[in-house]
Image (tube, helix red, strand yellow):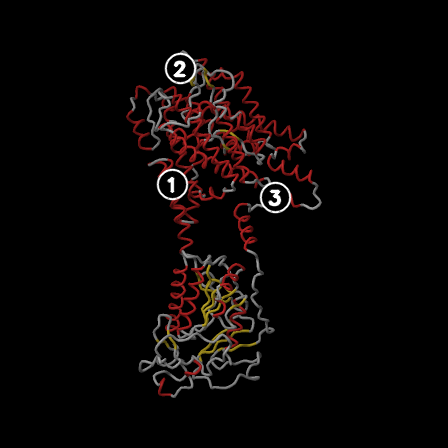
Amino acid sequence: MVNTPPPEKHLDEQHHQPQSSIASIDFYTPLRLSIDGTPRAAATGPSPTNQPIIPEGPIPPPPSSRSPPPPFPEAHHAITISNNGSFLGSHNHPSPPPLRPPPGGGGGKKGGGGDNGINVIDDCAVEEIHEVCHPPHVSLWDKLRGRLNEIFFPEDPFHVFRKRNQSPATKFVEAVQYVFPIIGWLRTYDFDVFRSDLIAGLTIASLAIPQGISYAKLANLPPIIGLSSKKFSSFGTDSSFVPPMIYAVLGSSRHLGIGPVSVASLIIGSELSQSVSPETQTELYVSLAFTTTLFAGLLQTGLGIFRLGFIIDFLSKATLTGFMAGAAVIVILQQLKGLFGITHFTKQMQIIPVLKSVIHEEKEQWTWQTVVICLSFLALLLVARQVSAKKPKLFWVSALAPLTSVIISTLVVFILKSKLQKVATIGKLPEGVNPSSLHKLYFHGPYLSVAIKTGILAGVLSLTEGIAVGRTCASMNNYQIDGNKEMIAIGAMNVCGCLCSCYVVSGGFARSAVNYNAGAKTAFSNVVMALAILITLLFLMPLFYYTPNAVLAAIITSAVIGFIDVKAAYNLWKLDKLDFLISMCSFFGVLFISVPIGLAIAVGISLLKIILNVSRPFTSELGNIPGTRIYRNLSCYNNARRVPAFLILTIESPIYFANSMYLQERIIRWIREEEQRIQETGDAILKCVILDITAVTNIDSSGIEMLYQLKRTMDRSLLHLVLVNPVAIVMERLQNSKFLATFDARGLYLTIGEAVSDVSSSWRN
């Protein structure tokens, strides 16, 4: 027969032991263990003269039913708490309070005194303690369906099909309109809307033509390329013709201006030129550009179809701020070739090789005429931007400035061609639309991986820019766009565009801003722009023969200089230093390493920030605003007061495997620090720890195991653990895990005020 040790006695029984068993502890101080397992006593009682006798083995948890508290006071300290849970005050007794029943009877709720220093008074009506309800049962299938809907369909795109009394024909029309938004606005289209779209379309066409040619040169796609005895027009201009027609049918934004964008052009020009020379391997380079566009479009379409648009949200504002600024600096440095008229320029995009190429270039190759033309028209474009920025009604000034610069510079070079022979010009551009490029797609060979990598990078960044611009315009006009539908529309543009001699396009900032300020009402403004560009391709291309490359460099510089947002970087520094660090890593990574590596560094640091926020969640101690039932962070509210004998903590994060151990250690540290503070100040001894888990939106098995361990640790220290206001999913999992069975009747409350009121009222008996 195995000898079992005698059962340990509860705290209540320890007070009735012979005095010799606890001779070293003051009569008014119960035997307790601190959170680290060492004996502790009330701060206000005399210090023990000898080490107390502690029974071996763990102290069992208190029984599940409510048991009467110890009949002796724990400290010579009076605490006043109203029945609504607000803390009214406290004071020290000059001597231990006498043992007496509370006035008005043993268990009445009205009365003034408590035998162990907790006074509960009635400054208002006695409140009812509300029960924390268990969530209703939901089947596994319903849970899975609801969760998937929240992940992939947060905006509920199918709500239009759930209207009452809808006929099958109406539902069919709604379905077709959902796929082709053009049907929706064509049904209410009128002449006034057409007039607004016509003006806006012609305005952005005047901007799109010179920008298209300039961005094509930025992507190292020259305006004239000889392929199989067939000369091609400007890829940038062609890219401003076909894709806008497709977007008008599939897109949901009313103001997005479609065409080539600087970031995608920069990525294509920098990544492809590192593997293939655009001058000596022109045909292969163009084929890779078309293939890059195809993979970019397939990626964008796939993200939209499979509702994976949330992936691009990992490109935070801080990341994009630094990346766009770095990319803008790289683009501007690349225009030094056009500014100085340099013929032999580095193919690298980093700042150091570019500056070396400019400094070591023979000064004889510089032409002062080119510098004058470039700087003069750059100043004109920047002044026009400032005029339109200060007076939005004069939007047409900045919109017409690029085309005006092209026309004026072309006339100047044509008139003074005998004196400006060293000024490089575009040259002859054949008329007509580029033929199909299906046979030019590159699917076999050593450079396929380069096209795939470039397509993914250009596709993600152009998609991010397009959706950001579309949402901004939509919010300014009180309508919404479906991000996933926009992905499908932009992806379809690029898939179709790669078959029509176009490279990556999206919604650009400058073009969309002009479209918005010009008064566009629907996506038909893109159709007007496309038709204007078609007329230019068919009849007006020879007029660009004398257009100087320096003007194109000025147009590109003025377009991207706005991406260097110093104010946004300063705001990041003021708001979040880690976000500022992410932005700077992206900026300097693009400048000194490469575009993809700089972006990857910024994204990596952003993911590290997410991991840190998840694994190290915020916890704080709460105090009561006097005279109210409101509890707020003690470090933020100077008038918040601690409730003696209580430690009230809040957790502001889901409890997962990644942070469960940290939270357990942090809560124990809170308790240890509170006990040290009590010893220093002489406040009432800590008896109850309240965890406000309102902000705990989820909990997994590791989190529940952490609560089990925390509960056992606090039971050994004779501390009462209380949970407040668990949300439905947390309540369900706590119930399924049987964790709630370890609590007594005073372990779960709806509010902090109810917990403080009910627990403190139990102590006065």
State whether residue 492 is above or below residue 88. above
Residue 543 picture location, percent across and down? 49, 16
* Label 2 Cα neighbours within 10 Å, binned few <14 / some 14-19 / many ≥20: some
Q: Find the distance from the CA under tag 3 to the CA under tag 2.
A: 63 Å
Discs 3, 2 touching: Cβ within 8 Å: no
- Quickly name the residue at label 2: 420
- Quickly name the residue at label 3: 158
In this view, which residue lies farthest toward the front?
1
Q: How many marks?
A: 3
Residue 605 picture location, percent across and down? 38, 46
What is the three-letter code of the residue carrying label 3? Phe
* Label 3 Cα neighbours within 10 Å, binned few <14 / some 14-19 / many ≥20: few
Label for residue 582?
none
Q: Quadrant of residue 471?
A: top right
What is the three-letter code of the residue carrying label 1? Ala
| Front residue (pair 221, 246) | 246
Going from the N terminus, do you reach mark 1 or mark 2 first?
Answer: 2
Helix or strand or loop: what does disc 2 sit on? loop
- Quickly name the residue at label 1: 600
State whether residue 739 is above or below residue 184. below
Residue 736 picture location, percent across and down? 50, 63
